[in-house]
Amino acid sequence: MLSGRRIVLGITGSIAAYKAADLARQLVKAGAEVTVVMTENACRFITPLTFRTLTRGPVITGFFAEQAEPVPHIALAQWAELILIAPATADTIAKTAVGRADDLLTAMLLDTTAPILWAPAMNTRMWDNSVTRENVKKLTQRGHHWVQPTEGELACAETGRGRLAEVEDIVAAVQNLLLPASRLTGKQVLITAGPTREPWDAIRFLSNRSSGKMGYALAEEARRRGAKVTLLSGPVALIPPAGIDLVTVNTAREMYAAAKKAFVQTDIFMAAAAVADFRPAESKTNKIKKSKAPETIALVPNPDILLELGQHKGEKIVVGFAAESDKVVDAAKQKRVKKNCDLMVANAAGGEADAFAADHAQVFILDNQDQVEALPSLPKAQVASVICDRIETLIKEKNSPHTQKTGTRRRRGRKENEEEK
Ligand code: CTP
């Protein structure tokens, strides 16, 4: 969810500092790269070693502590995509409100252009004090963000507002800030990925070289944009992205049955799987002995999942993939129409390089007006991001009353009728 996102976690001198250990753990678990900055007082409540162990990243405790960068506050301020201060004391809030920079954390806050998120923790009267209120207001006006403290029993044995917000609420606030609003948020996305295996006997099967990388990259990207993702995967050697529903299948018929079931609830269907078109007409449950092997194996066609589901797509958005060895764009155009897809992503198959296993892909994206966008060779994660961008454009067009009435489409300045390679 926060995969690769760079977060500085600032910890200040509050008894709630021990909760920052769980917070750091959750951020790392969500995939973030976390650098911890601790004030001198924070180090009295909890040790830097705890955070070094949990984040496996640097923990910086002051301007002059041992660290790689000569001016750590500036390097960190630029590195961070978000600075989270949790727990935040009244003192650090006050110092930041007046622009003081006498420790590494406040110096960094003065230098950064990254969003700043505060999760305060303090005694109720300190939180309610008009000076703190003014400081909070001042920082809010400067664009700072807050996860409000909650009510409950405080460390000082009093009860009231001032408890550090729950860790999951702080992580949710981080996600809200780092993951920009997307038209995929809340959408139900179904993705098929990988090859299928069509058994011939107990140990032999018919399959193909699909690695599943494209489908898995799409699942990761759609999830990152807030979609609810069901990934229907054939056998692959990949670690599934966090936060998605993974359904594993072997055969095309299993994939078809699972896809048909999930399709009902789906808003967007992406068929990235390399489904085996045929299966052996007969499949034995025992091992066929060499001496008894037939000279030929009879094949029967498998269901075409995309073709079947595309015919019933209604308002759903359907994205197909086409691996072609000849006349890539022309063949993909025909396939897009035949399978009733809104987008068709085509790439050249065959040749010496194994396109299936590669981490990069060079694709053409054809839309429902047969406009062709040729992308350069990109990492599959980036191809997934462009495909999700195009889907977001389709959602926008579908939602636009102008488009609905007139059928006009926004042009994206794409290369039209791209020459085939
Ligand atoms: N597809 C599918 N079910 C099948 C075969 C293909 O859902 N039984 C989907 C693929 O996931 C892909 C698209 O259809 O999105 C095109 O697949 P491709 O293998 O390129 O084409 P085919 O339809 O199999 O046609 P051909 O093999 O003749 O190129």
Image (cartoon, rainbow, N blue to C red):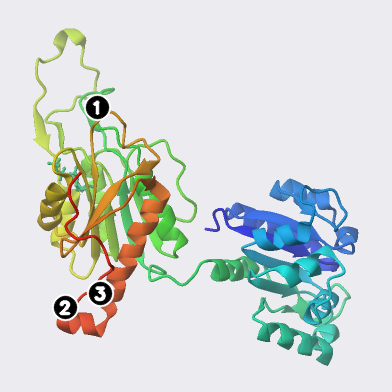
Mark 2 lies on residue: 407
- Measured Cα–Cα span from mark 3 to mark 2: 10 Å
Residue closest to the far top:
291
Residue 301: percent from the left, percent from the top?
Answer: 11, 38
Residue 205 marker: 1
Q: Residue at x 17, y 7 (%)?
A: 291
How many marks can you see?
A: 3
- Measured Cα–Cα span from mark 1 to mark 2: 47 Å
Q: Residue at x 73, y 69 (%)?
A: 111
- Point out the frontmost of discs 1 and 3: 3
Position of residue 411 in the picture relative to residue 59 (left or right): left
SS for tag 2?
Answer: loop
- Point out the frontmost of discs 1 and 2: 2
Position of residue 301 in the picture relative to residue 25 (left or right): left
Residue 21: percent from the left, percent from the top?
Answer: 74, 57
Residue 280: percent from the left, percent from the top?
Answer: 15, 29
Q: Is residue 22 visible?
A: no
User: Three-letter amino acid code at disc 2?
Assistant: Gly
What quarter of the picture does the C terminus occupy? top left
Question: Are there few (<14), some (14-19), or many (20+) residues within 10 Å of tag 2?
Answer: few
Query: Is 338 situated above or below 395?
Result: above
Mark 3 lies on residue: 410
Q: Residue at x 76, y 48 (%)?
A: 52
SS for tag 3?
Answer: loop
Label 1 with label 2: CB-CB less than 8 Å: no
Name which of mark 1 and mark 3 comes first in the sequence.
Answer: 1
User: Three-letter amino acid code at disc 3?
Assistant: Arg
Query: Is 330 situated above or below 45?
Result: above
Question: Are there few (<14), some (14-19), or many (20+) residues within 10 Å of tag 3?
Answer: few
- Point out the frontmost of discs 3 and 2: 3
Residue 110: percent from the left, percent from the top?
Answer: 75, 72
